[in-house]
Image (cartoon, rainbow, N blue to C red):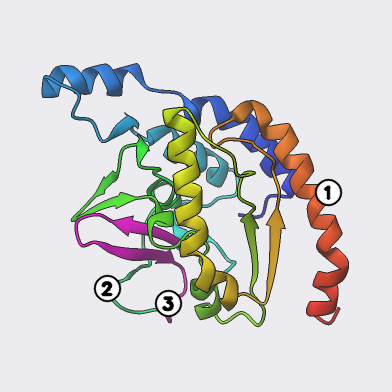
Amino acid sequence: MGYTTDEMYKLFNYFAKSVMSISPRYFFGGIKQKKGIQLGGLTSGENIELAVEEAARLKSIKNIKDIKMPIAIPTTDLISDREIIFTNNEDAQGEQYIHDIEIGKAVRASCSFPGMYAPLEYGKFQFADGGIFDNLPALQTRKLGVDKVISIKFKLNYPRKQRTLYNIAMQSIDLMSENLIKDSVNESDFVISIDLKDVKPFSISKLEFCYQQGYLQTLDYITKLKKELNM
């Protein structure tokens, strides 16, 4: 959308608590309505959509078509059991692609992490996290017509015996994700692998640490990256 990295970090800090908060209206209202815990997640994901909409509005962006840079955002349709791509690339045609959707809904659909955020109900679709099928969309980036694909991934947490339900679940998801992205890593021309130590997903108190580590570790790749890109 045209934000610098520093501006994006400030936006993350500004919106983090609201994006991660559990909406009492959604949670308890859903239990009361369904007469039991039959919710799609701990929260609806609406705050993700609102945060992205607000950030986009400052750049006069509403629809994915308003973004000038070529973009592809993967999500998962639970109803058809397939990957869907939101893209402004009109050359990408087929039932897999959606070219006309609000940017807030596209981002919300792509990061509706199962269990945490309820799937986004959108027309005939039920969208969940794009990482279910494509956690490193190098191939989709290649289809945009780029010359070089630079992928960013995170190293696995240091292996050790896990004891809590949360840690076991997160370690299992990390292992599955690492296995799923093998083809995408091979499809990439250059891969930046960031080590965030043992920072857990949704740890908003670690935003500063993650930002600094990402910045410093990426600097270490600059020489290799420039050589790869013939700069």
In the depicted view, which residue is nearer to us: 109 or 11? 109
What residue type is disc 3 on?
A: Glu
Foreground disc of the pair 2, 1: 1
Task: Identify residue for label 2.
Answer: 95
Q: Within 10 Å of the Cα at label 2, are there few (<14), some (14-19), or many (20+) other Cα atoms? A: few
Residue type at mark 1 is: Leu
Q: Is label 2 in a helix, a strand or a loop?
A: loop
Name the residue: 31% across, 38% down.
118
Residue 183 in the image, given as x and y percentages of width and height: 51, 73
Q: Is residue 183 above or below residue 63?
A: below
* Residue 83, magenta (yes or no): yes
Q: Position of residue 131 (x, y in %)?
A: 43, 55
Q: CA distance from mark 2 to mark 1?
A: 41 Å
Image mark for residue 141: none
Residue placed under numbered mark 1 in the picture: 216
Q: Position of residue 191 (x, y in %)?
A: 68, 67
Q: Earlier in the sequence, mark 2 or mark 1?
A: 2
